[in-house]
């Protein structure tokens, strides 16, 4: 079975109509993947925040790993930060639900590709999380995300390509520098040890 490790880039783009206790708050988003934690900046007193911040997460297995998303409101002090709402999404389901290029049957099940084969290639999706107020202590609103999946083997290939290009660039630069230095040395020798001209040789021959 092939490994499906990779890098997941999540851009938290914006929020819409975010409310806590029916009022606007100081919203920010916290993301959790395995033991990795990232968060956006908090924006003051707004229902429609624009974050547009990107974060990278290492994924061990997209079929099993989950993304936990907390929508929070920042207080004056850290202990006053409040959870507006939260949810967890499996990486596999996230992409399989959102990728419009996938062929589905009448029940919405993906037909044209196997799960692990799908994550051997790069993919990009847009996703809207709709938070519903299920109890009085929670808030509501939507958060819009953009996500890019890059499998490990493609990242390694790209890094190797960049490393090879850098190596060749350095080699070419050294070759040019070496040729330039050689030309400078030749010029120096010509200046320091001037060659006798033909006229001098002819003069010497006539005197003999």
Image: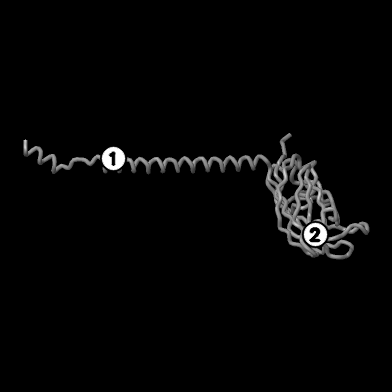
Mark 2: few, some, or many residues within 10 Å (few <14, many ≥20)? many
Query: Closer to us: mark 2 or mark 1?
Result: 1
Task: Please tell me whether residue 36 is drawn above or below residue 25 in the rendered image.
Answer: above
Q: Which mark is residue 189?
A: 1
Label 1 sits on a secondary structure element that is: helix
Q: Relative to 59, is 76 on the left or the right?
A: right
Any part of residue 109 in sight? no
Q: Relative to 180, is 49 on the left or the right?
A: right
Query: Along the line of sight, which residue is nearer the eye, 206 or 4?
Result: 206
Residue at the image point whose x is 52% and y is 43% from the top: 166
Q: Which mark is residue 27?
A: 2
Q: Residue 124 at what x, y percent from top left?
A: 70, 51
Q: Residue 1 at what x, y percent from top left?
A: 74, 34
Q: Relative to 99, is 191 on the left or the right?
A: left
Query: Along the line of sight, which residue is nearer the eye, 77 or 21?
Result: 77
Query: Along the line of sight, which residue is nearer the eye, 108 or 22?
Result: 22
Residue at the image point whose x is 74% and y is 61% from the top: 50
């Amino acid at each position: 079975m092939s490994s499906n490790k990779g890098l997941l880039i999540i851009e938290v783009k914006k929020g819409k109509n975010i409310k806590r206790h029916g009022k606007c708050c100081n919203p920010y988003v916290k993301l959790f993947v395995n033991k990795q934690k990232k968060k956006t900046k908090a924006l003051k007193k707004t229902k429609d925040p624009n974050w547009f911040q990107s974060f990278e997460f290492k994924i061990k297995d997209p079929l099993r790993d989950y993304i936990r998303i907390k929508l929070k409101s920042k207080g004056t002090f850290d202990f006053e930060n409040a959870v507006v709402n939260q949810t967890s999404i499996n990486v596999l389901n996230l992409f399989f639900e959102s990728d419009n290029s996938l062929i589905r049957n009448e029940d919405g099940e993906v037909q044209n590709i196997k799960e692990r084969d799908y994550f051997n290639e790069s993919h990009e999706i847009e996703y809207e999380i709709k938070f519903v107020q299920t109890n009085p202590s929670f808030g509501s609103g939507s958060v819009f995300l953009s996500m890019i999946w890059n499998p490990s083997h493609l990242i390694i290939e790209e890094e190797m390509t960049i490393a090879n290009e850098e190596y060749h660039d350095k080699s070419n630069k050294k070759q040019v520098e070496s040729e330039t230095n050689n030309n400078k040395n030749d010029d120096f020798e010509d200046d320091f040890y001037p060659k006798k001209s033909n006229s001098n040789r002819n003069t010497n021959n006539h005197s003999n």
